[in-house]
Amino acid sequence: MIRKWYNKEKQGGVNLKKLFQILLYAIVFSALVGCVKPVSEQKSDYELDLFVEGKILVQKAGKYGFLNKKGEIVIDFIYDYANKFYNGVTVVKVDSEFFLIDEEGNQLSDQKFAYLSIEPHGGLVKIGGGFLGYSYGLMDLTGKVLLEDNFNFIDDFSEGFARYKKDRKYGFITEKGKYLTEVEYDYAESFSDGLAIVKIDSKYGYINSKGELVIDTIYDGAEPFFEGLAVVVVKTDQKYSYQVIDKTGNTLFSDYDMIERTKNVFVCSKEGKFFIIDKQGNIIPLSEKYTEVVAGGIEDWGKNVTFFVASDGEAEYALDENGREIFSSEPEEGYEMANSGIDFVTFKGWVAFYNESTLILKTTAGDYLEYSWTSEDLEIYVFNEKIALSQNDKWGVIDFSGKQIIKFRYDFITLTRDGCAVVEKDGLLGVLDLKGNIIIPIEYEDIDYWDIDY
């Protein structure tokens, strides 16, 4: 079924301590498995567009259909499943059969399948069938089959190529359904910054878009390239040594116990001390009070943020790329911490404190808001420069000047990237603009939302 639109944590509402723990776990896990998914492959559930190609997918009386931006029905509620439109084509399901339709609701061909899904990065359709949905293939948006084989899976396209798995081996196919190379790997990751991680005999290296091995498989762990640089790991004497390399395989700096990255710098540790290293190799030592320092660079959003998180064992701190403390998890006297997280459109970090009369909100970009408050409890998140919060168990929206945009009258609100708000009231969903006007009446059982990279 389509994804449920609401998820408070996915909207960026993650406690600073929780965010610290999530980042720490992700870094340790990446060291154990050797590599992680590149930003180009991962799809974010946080950066939300609501309307795609002028249409929104909704559910009513158990069936799915499409509305336009005026709330008018453009494709009737007759489908057991439906997917987002891409270049005027979408996937729908009736009973157990999947097929393609156009924007008028016309079936494009007589072909029907056990499973279909549009892959928007490549502009193609994945075909699935067989036991547990295996035996994948590809066809174009006209229904022409380009490739059929017994794949375990075909991943999303990235930079013109999609990795696949077949018979415990990995490889790559092009958007024309051709194999990039006859060589298959023990493991591979999607292309990022022109190169893809591959694994041969327990060691990692990188291939280019011609399928040529341009950086030898000599590493025990590897992360995707981003802006010409990548973090790799070499294991020596039961110890992991982290390094940063360029696209020629040259090592720029090495022999660290951990290396993570933000948008512009690397965060490193060695023998219990922490450092910032910029792309020119300049080193800034961090305060020795910190016992842990982590960044978000292995996450899809991490390479866009310009801050990282540190802990001294008592509190957590957001630091800028020069190592200066921006804010901490410790509340001011008379306040308690409500929540913290990231605006996944602007990539600002934020933290909120409150007492019985006042809410204080700070961001890593220096935004500061004091807002009159009358509720005993506070739920809050920041998305696309707007603040959604609850007051007396009802949700509304304000901006950073404290102006109320949407009144506090809804059971929950999801802000979207394209300037809308999905609202829930008495178990039904609708859509408002950011002036509080109703776009889609509050009468639907479900509403789909769209990824920012779609």
Image (cartoon, helix red, strand yellow):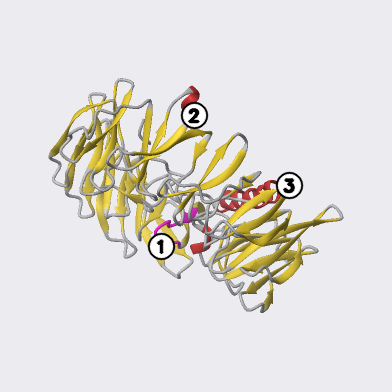
Distance from Cα at disc 3 to Cα at disc 1: 41 Å
Quadrant of res 60:
top left
User: Label 3 crowding class (10 Å Cα cut-off): few <14, some 14-19, many 20+?
Assistant: few
Residue 137 tag number: none
Residue occupying image coordinates x 56% and y 51%: 19
Q: Earlier in the sequence, mark 3 or mark 1?
A: 3
Distance from Cα at disc 1 to Cα at disc 2: 38 Å
Q: Earlier in the sequence, mark 3 or mark 2?
A: 2
Q: Which residues are magenta?
A: 340-347
| Rendered location of residue 369, percent (x, y) | 39, 64
Residue 346 tag number: 1
Residue 134 tag number: 2
| Rendered location of residue 157, percent (x, y) | 45, 49
Q: Nearer the viewer, residue 243 or 268?
A: 243
**Residue flagged by tag 1: what amino acid is it?**
Thr
Tell me how many marks there are.
3
| Rendered location of residue 147, percent (x, y) | 42, 39
Height in image: 278 above or below 30?
below
Q: Nearer the viewer, mark 1 or mark 2?
A: 2
**Residue flagged by tag 3: what amino acid is it?**
Asp
Mark 2, secondary structure of its residue: loop
Q: Name the image quarter holding the N terminus.
A: top left
